Image (cartoon, helix red, strand yellow):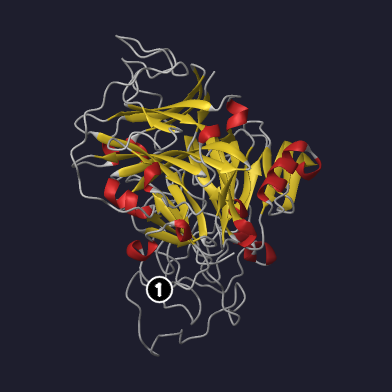
Amino acid sequence: MAREFQRGHKAKISDLTAGTDLYVGVQISAPGLTFDISCFGLDASERLSDDRYFIFFNQPKSPEESIQLLGAQAGDTESFRVTLDRIPQQIQRLSFTATIDGAGQMSQVASGYIRVVAGGEEVARYAFSGAEFSTERAVMLGDFYLKDVWRFAAIGQGFDGGLDALLKNFGGEVAEEEPAPAQPQAAVPSFAPPAQASAPPAFGAPAAAPAPAPAPVPAPAQNFAPPSPAPAQNFPPPPGATPPPAPADPAVYAAQTIVAPVNQPPYGQQPQPPQYGQVPGQQHAPGQSAPPPPGYGQPPQAPMPPGYGQQPPSGQFPGQPQAPHGAPQGAAPQGAGVAAALQKYREAPTGQRWTQQNEKLIRVDLGVADQPILARQGSMVLYQGKVEFGYKGAGFAGRVVGNATGQEMQLMRCSGRGQVFLAEEGTHLHPIELQGDAICVSAENVLAFDETLQHEVRRIEGHGIPGGALFVMQFQGTGTVIVKTHGVPVVLPVTPTTFADCHAVVAWSAAAQAIVSSQVRMRSNAYAGSTGESVNLQFRGAPGNFIVVQPYEV
């Protein structure tokens, strides 16, 4: 049974098959487009140091015939024969690529795949679609590379430019175009899958349906969304902005906290005329109240939601109707004092599973949905009810996450019936609700998540990254992830020239591709100048993808 690969997945060839005589098939379905599918034989520096190992339509085999171009067969647009034990020592990577011949872009691809067949049996397949690309005209599909042993990696990296630009990127030279000699039809070798006259073989892509494509690009319906005319949800409004009226059942109260002045008179004390900002003897217009003293924030004209961020007018406790202008203010209201002063900080009960108490504290009700959560150890600041905490650092799952990331990320499992309040170092918290879609979050920015979510730790390697790699957690399914940021983040759309400091990146859409820019050979052309940062990430993806960046470097 073929092993399904996703972009970035790698495996030893010996784990897939014991053979070294392999068939590589590439199929691309894109109406109106034609493709040049090639193989680059690269040295240890990933350079085409020997042009004889550039295998394409004008050079269909290497000198010792360890790499051969076979042509279209068995349902594949193009196919190769690779004999690993005959590849010379100086060739340590085989990169299979596809470039558009003529006008067009990779986003027009309906479906495609690269597969590996050994002994007539398909052992590996990586499927892709145009939704993963935008304006690129070439794509690096997959690699065989030598790292102690031969391995296979699903790449799926788009490339701006055609075959000539790709050849120059690998250090080759573009020769004058010559007419291609007529090539006899190559016989199907014994190791290849059997050819059929009317339909591709069982392990190939069905003729009536396209090859299985990866998960569709998630619509940015979660709380981190690309910039649009409406502001992204769950991020606090800019300072000074008037909060909108409260919804029927608000999930987050993002109104600013209004700080009372230190010289505010106690509740019930008769204010002394003239009031601040009023000329002695001046009368107020009907319905107009006197300006507040300096430092005291004006309450908004529209009613604010009860609870976090709402400051009652001077001399009035929460819930008391405001006295008409001119009414006596000397009588102390019932309930004034400590309770009234702390009223605005009371817990905000909503009956939902996740409730944000303020921008830096969130509560989870374990009784809703009766499902446990996983949270960072040490992030619990208070809990109520019968809650059990299982520290995952002592168990199998915790060791997987903690050791895989290498960033001492230890998780605890919170279960039972009760409420748990979570926070960490005063960072801003942002709940992201997933509805079957996916998102990638830097491991350093994950605070908690529903145990029902599928999560996977991924490693982005690159020279210059502290520790040698950046660790990312990809979440997918139905549930909520709590992301923490230092300061208010910004959401930006992914464009062909989107670069970000790897320490400031918080999250990005799962369909976007993150590449260490120091490994992009044409960086001087694509991104001139030096930013002073040790290493940057380049993001690529189709329109609709986004990244989230915080104003802070971890």
Place residue 70 in its image quadrant.
top left
**At x 35% / y 82%, what residue is drawn?**
283
Provide residue 169's location: percent of width, then percent of height.
Answer: 36, 54
Number of numbered tags placed on the structure image = 1
Query: Residue most toward the front?
Result: 64
Relative placement, left or right, of 25 versus 102 is right
Provide residue 417's location: percent of width, then percent of height.
Answer: 73, 35
Decide: is 455 above or below 276.
above
Query: Residue most toward the bottom?
Result: 280
Which three-letter amino acid code belongs to the residue tagged 1? Ser
**At x 34% / y 44%, what residue is drawn?**
542
Q: Secondary structure at mark 1?
A: loop
Provide residue 18's location: percent of width, then percent of height.
Answer: 61, 24
Place residue 274 in its image quadrant.
bottom left
Provide residue 402's location: percent of width, then percent of height.
Answer: 71, 47
Q: Which of the pair 170/526 is nearer the observer? A: 170
Q: Is residue 236 visible?
A: no
Query: Residue most toward the right?
Result: 394
Relative placement, left or right, of 5 versus 27 is right
Q: Which of the pair 527/499 is nearer the observer? A: 527
Q: Is residue 513 visible?
A: yes
Place residue 428 in its image quadrant.
bottom right
Please name the residue that numbered disc 1 is placed on: 289
Decide: is 421 above or below 438.
below
Quadrant the C terminus occupies:
bottom right
Callout 1: few (<14), some (14-19), or many (20+) C-alpha neighbours within 10 Å? few
**At x 52% / y 46%, what residue is drawn?**
440
Q: Which of the pair 425/18 is nearer the observer? A: 18
**At x 54% / y 59%, what residue is drawn?**
320
Q: Which of the pair 508/323 is nearer the observer? A: 508
Quadrant the N terminus occupies:
top right
